[in-house]
Amino acid sequence: MSLNVALLGFGTVGRAVARIIVERSLPFRLTHVYNRDVTRKVVDWLPPGTVWTERLDDVLAAPLDIVVETMGGLEPAGTAVRHALDAGTPVVTANKQLIAQQGTDLLARAAASGCELAFEASVGGGIPVICGVRDGLAGDRLLSVSGILNGTSNYILTRMASAGASFADALAEAQAQGFAEADPTDDVDGFDARAKLCILARVALAVDLRPDEVECRSIRPLRPIDIVYARRLGSAIRQVAHVERAGDDGVVAWVQAALVPLASPLAQVDGGQNLVLATGASGGRTSFAGFGAGGGPTAVAVVSDLLAIARGHRSRLAPARRPARVMGGAPVPHYLRFVVRDRPGIIADLARVLAQHDINIDAVLQEPGTAKEALPFVVTLEAADGTTVQDALSRISHLDFHVEPPLVLPFLT
Ligand SMILES: NC(=O)c1ccc[n+]([C@@H]2O[C@H](COP(=O)([O-])OP(=O)(O)OC[C@H]3O[C@@H](n4cnc5c(N)ncnc54)[C@H](OP(=O)(O)O)[C@@H]3O)[C@@H](O)[C@H]2O)c1
């Protein structure tokens, strides 16, 4: 018997979902496809009975077994999902911003109506990380989750490393190849990874973490010279998202570019791939890797959720608690990169401010043959907490020799 499914949003993911359902003759009947200006979207490979519509109210009033939301954005997606759940209709969504920001309310509505809210596609595209963590690792007490959660940023960083490209050129290439949106803000400034991190915090750690509580830094200030210095230091640069338990009721959470050892699994993640590392008290570290985006992989996650609902599977998420504190992390070594108008005494000036903050310099690195009027060099620091390093850096940034703002990156072990 086929289940009646409405598809809200017929873009990259929605279209790929419909393709899989049709090509694999899965037991779902796409009764409605909702999209704005829907006539642009009509295809001839869906059954003739499918209703193509711009009227969301009509779709939600129809007798549906499952609603699939692949529109994105908070509205009207949120209204549609709430309406379906309140009516007891299971929902499958790929919408990370909606789940990250409104997951508590939506899951409560699903529980009150006794229906499923499935969101495997919202993190890691086609990687089954939500069910892997929620069900596969349910026997462990998970302590932390880290990973590369944004394929666009990872593509840019790996192109900067492999082709020596500038950030702007690598971004333009990612956009030309369809890996990056015209407006790359969510990807490169970390907001996309932050939303996914909040979803993982809920699923893995039962923590109700809100996106605006997570410290988030852009990869835009990175320069090709940072890749060169990172390599000299035996590291690669990756946009990493991390959340871990801190004490009984706190968490450490951040999204930022970081230096990771070349031997780390994080450094092995190339192009648009994603990697999630879940660490448990009993089971140690488990990796989930694969394509983190793209119509095909993401649609696989949506269709897998649909099939699970069709089989009567009910996911059980432990109730998430609000963290008492969200912190920036334990002390780690840091990388500071400066671009300066050279003059005598610059290192002495830096060392004085760092010493005033009780921060020890580990090494100073300078590539030979660079112009004196815009000289890049790097200072590595012994372990210090991020807030203290930021305080020192804001003092240092007022010194008179900078050609561009200094950059700070943590080293991860
Ligand atoms: N693409 C991926 O690789 C990927 C991976 C993981 C998760 N996701 C998530 O999946 C969802 C869909 O992403 P996508 O890449 O498929 O986006 P997309 O290609 O832009 O598709 C979204 C579709 O929904 C329609 N739509 C958007 N807002 C609408 C509104 N207010 N009213 C009516 N129709 C609306 C769009 O119409 P127009 O054509 O008029 O814009 C488009 O057809 C998002 O939540 C995204 O975060 C995507």
Image: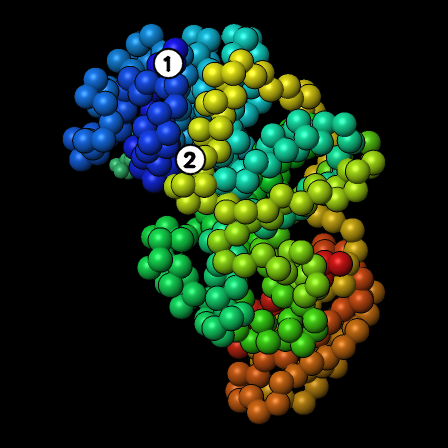
Q: Secondary structure at mark 2?
A: helix
Which of the 4 quarters of the picture holds residue 134? top right
**What residue is shown with label 1?**
2
Which of the 4 quarters of the picture holds residue 288? top right
Which of the 4 quarters of the picture holds residue 331? bottom right
Q: In this rendering, does residue 98 appear at all?
A: no
Identify the amino acid type marked 2: Ala
Q: Is residue 127 above or below residue 203?
A: below
Identify the residue shown where x is 37% and y is 14%: 2
**What residue is shown with label 2?**
299
**Residue closest to the eye, 192 or 130:** 130
Identify the amino acid type marked 1: Ser
Question: x, y (%) of residue 66?
Answer: 41, 16
Q: Is residue 72 above or below residue 178?
A: above
Identify the residue shown where x is 71% and y is 42%: 286
Residue 40 horizontal side relative to residue 165, left or right = left
